[in-house]
Image (cartoon, rainbow, N blue to C red):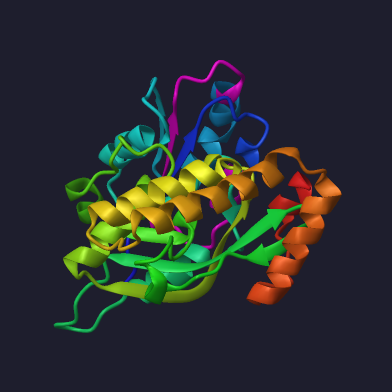
């Protein structure tokens, strides 16, 4: 039995990359979903781009919602988008990110299927391909390490809509409220399910990627608030010094040096990935 899925795109003045995301959603070979664009009151031509797709979704009888309203940041916008969702599961595929292929939603629907008496998964996740410095690699997926760091990309997550609304994103966090949400789900003991599919392609230029130091320090605070962070003040100070060095490299080193460093990291971490690039991403490249 198929499930109804709500795909939500958060955007603000992202007209240049929004078509990439929309095309990947529209190309899904699955019809039991709705598409919500939560726009933080963009001042570019986002409304015109959104309007140009309205009839295409209508032709497939897919619910298409465009909310244009100022918000308090990405996590506030995600909460606002969730309030409009009517699906069983919610996925946040934000502007500039996209689905990996045409079969993602059908694969997730298969993963959500349960036998009589079996617990419905509250979080379904998958792999995420990251594009950076002209190459692709895999986001390091590991549910087993959720109490150490972000276990997988939030774009690869489909969360039960009732759970999302019961546990909205904490907007006091600027970079890692998605990690806080996943830790909350883990603390509650809900079922996580790996869809065994590559869900999305993202680029490594988002807020949390660019603000590497602040993101990881905020993640440390989140772990502490969940009672899972056990470093001493001395250890934390050492970690912070290391993060500041890494942030300096990101901010000031030339691209070719950063590319060499990233290539070495990808190889050592086993993150190599040779994608089949979908047509909507080829157009973007």
Rendering coords of residue 175 (x, y %): 44, 42
Which residue sits at x=38%, y=21%?
A: 69
Residue occupying the far front of the picture: 234
Q: Identify the residue at the far right of this view.
A: 256
Corner quadrant of residue 117: bottom left
Observer able to see residue 134: no
> Residue 74, percent across and down?
42, 35
Q: Is 48 situated above or below 254? A: above
Q: Does 39 sit above or below residue 206?
A: above
Residue 85 visible in rendering? yes
Looking at the image, residue 241 lies above or below residue 197: above
Residue 270 in percent (x, y) is at 66, 77
Front residue of this view, candidates 153 and 259: 259
In depth, the one of 40 and 143 nearer the eye is 143
Image position of 183 with respect to 168: above or below: below
Q: Residue shown at 38%/60% (left/top)?
A: 158
Q: Quadrant of residue 130?
A: bottom right
Camera-side residue of 16 and 152: 152
Q: Is residue 240 magenta?
A: no
Numbered circles on residues, count: 0
Q: Residue at x 22, y 60 (%)?
A: 227
Q: Quadrant of the N terminus?
A: bottom left
**The image quarter in which residue 118 lies:** bottom left
For the magenta stretch, what is the residue range? 21-46
Left or right of 212: which side holds 115?
A: left
Residue 254, given in percent of the width and then of the height, sits at 82, 43
**What residue occupies the far left of the structure in this picture?**
117
Taking the magenta stretch, the answer to whether it contains residue 36 is yes
């Amino acid at each position: 039995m198929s499930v109804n899925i709500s795909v939500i795109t958060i955007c603000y003045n992202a007209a240049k990359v929004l078509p990439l995301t929309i095309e990947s959603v529209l190309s899904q070979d699955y019809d039991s979903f709705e598409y919500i664009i939560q726009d933080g009151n963009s001042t570019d031509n986002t409304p015109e781009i959104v309007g140009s797709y309205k009839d295409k979704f209508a032709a497939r009888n897919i619910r298409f919602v465009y909310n244009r309203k100022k918000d308090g940041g990405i996590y506030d916008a995600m909460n606002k988008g969730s309030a409009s969702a009517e699906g069983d599961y919610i996925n946040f595929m934000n502007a500039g990110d996209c689905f990996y292929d045409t079969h993602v939603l059908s694969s997730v629907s298969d993963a959500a299927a349960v036998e009589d008496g079996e617990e419905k998964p509250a979080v379904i996740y998958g792999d995420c391909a990251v594009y950076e410095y002209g190459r692709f690699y895999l986001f390091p997926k590991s549910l087993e390490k959720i109490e150490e760091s972000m276990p997988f990309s939030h774009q690869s997550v489909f969360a039960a809509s009732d759970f999302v609304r019961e546990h909205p994103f904490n907007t006091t966090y600027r970079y890692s409220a998605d990690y806080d949400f996943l830790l909350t789900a883990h603390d509650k003991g809900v079922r996580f399910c790996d869809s065994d599919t590559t869900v999305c392609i993202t680029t490594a230029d988002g807020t949390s990627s660019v603000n590497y130091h602040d993101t990881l320090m905020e993640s440390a605070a989140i772990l502490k608030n969940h009672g899972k962070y056990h470093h001493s003040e001395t250890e934390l100070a050492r970690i912070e010094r290391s993060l500041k060095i890494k942030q300096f490299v990101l901010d000031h080193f030339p691209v070719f040096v950063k590319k060499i460093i990233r290539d070495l990291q990808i190889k050592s971490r086993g993150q190599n990935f040779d994608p089949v690039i979908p047509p909507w991403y080829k157009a973007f490249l």
